[in-house]
Amino acid sequence: MSHVKSKKIIWAIDAYGDVKVQASASDFAKSLGQHNDIQVVYIHGSSGFPVEKEKVAVRFGLSQAENQLKKIITKLEFKTRKKPIILAHGSDFVRAGVKTLLSYAKKVKADAILVSTNARVGFMRQALGSFAETLIIESTVPVMIVNPKAKVSSQPGTILFPTDFSNPSWKAYRQVVDFAKATDAKIKIFHQYQGESQTIPTSVSYFRSDKWLKGDSLLDKNFQKIKSKLSKWLSWTKTQNVKCDHVIKFGLKNIADATKEQAEKDRVWMIAMATVTGPIAATFLGSNARWIVRSANGPVWVLYVKGK
């Protein structure tokens, strides 16, 4: 894989956070780091920073943060090729920290940001107050979210890509293929068709209105379009020398639940999914992406694309 350009990934660590909560993210970072460059960062917020008369306090706070960052990296048993850095800003607000992280990610042209989240299931919060979820809303840089309870493979495996075969989804899929190539991962395309099962028996020939009917001509037009796009996606992926499989499920099952079920069945390395850029804060509250990020048993990669 030496001929493939490695990806630059920023891992945002909470230097003062619980090691157990961040252990799954560390395991995932280790699997990523075999093929990519991982930059560990800690976002240090301090109200009033920097103020001239508080220089001593600022130096002390940053020194403490640096020591704590080194300690947690050691506890997580993560070996870094790059020196960890601290991103300091002058606020205690979550959004200010997110903006600081995104500003740095764009400056260094990061391919993705990795972050752990304190996932809640059952009765979920209605407000998006956590760092991870604020990051998902604000970011245009792809974000990799790891649930603390996630089961993470030590080696890159299969990336499950749920799709509706729309143009925005295609844009995201091309990024996933590029990443799979750099990581030596496989891809499984997943589509939940909202309708009844459609299969064509191959042992019988059909004749109607002076024409032989066979294959896709017997399928619903919408499903014919799905199969046509799937065929094109698979053919293109093959030209990129990336291994790819697919599965189509039928029925009126919720897309997020169907994706989670498939991911657990296949024990995938991670789920990669597209979301359209723009003012998504309101729609994200009830979106498939939010539910998958909250409930998935493995890492979730959210890719941002322009489109409708």
Image (spheres, rainbow, N blue to C red):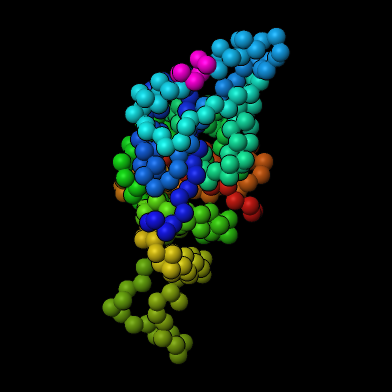
Reply above or below: 252 against 94. Answer: below
Percent position (x, y) of residue 289? 51, 42
In-front residue for pair 195/64: 64
Location of residue 106 (image quadrant): top right
Name the residue: 36% across, 68% down: 199
Decide if residue 291 is in sight here: no
The residues colored magenta run 63-68
Query: In front here: 135 or 124?
Result: 135
Q: How many marks?
A: 0
Residue at 63 percent across and 36 percent down: it is: 103
Residue 141 drawn at (x, y percent): 57, 43
Magenta part, dominant SS? helix
Residue 140 visible in this rendered orientation of the protein: yes
Question: Toward which corner of the image does residue 260 lie, by quadrant?
Answer: top left
Farthest residue toward the left? 203
The stretch drawn in magenta includes residue 66: yes
Q: Quadrant of residue 207?
A: bottom left
Quadrant where the N terminus is found in the figure: bottom left
Q: Is residue 176 magenta?
A: no
Which residue extends farthest bottom? 210
Q: Measuring 34% from the left and 82% from the top, which residue is drawn there? A: 205
Residue shown at 66% from the left, 44% from the top? 278
Please give left or right for residue 82 compared with residue 171 in the image.
Answer: left
Q: Is residue 27 above or below residue 48?
A: below
Q: Nearer the viewer, residue 187 or 263?
A: 187
Residue 136 x/y as whole percent? 56, 37
User: Of 177 and 109, which appears nearest the observer?
Assistant: 109
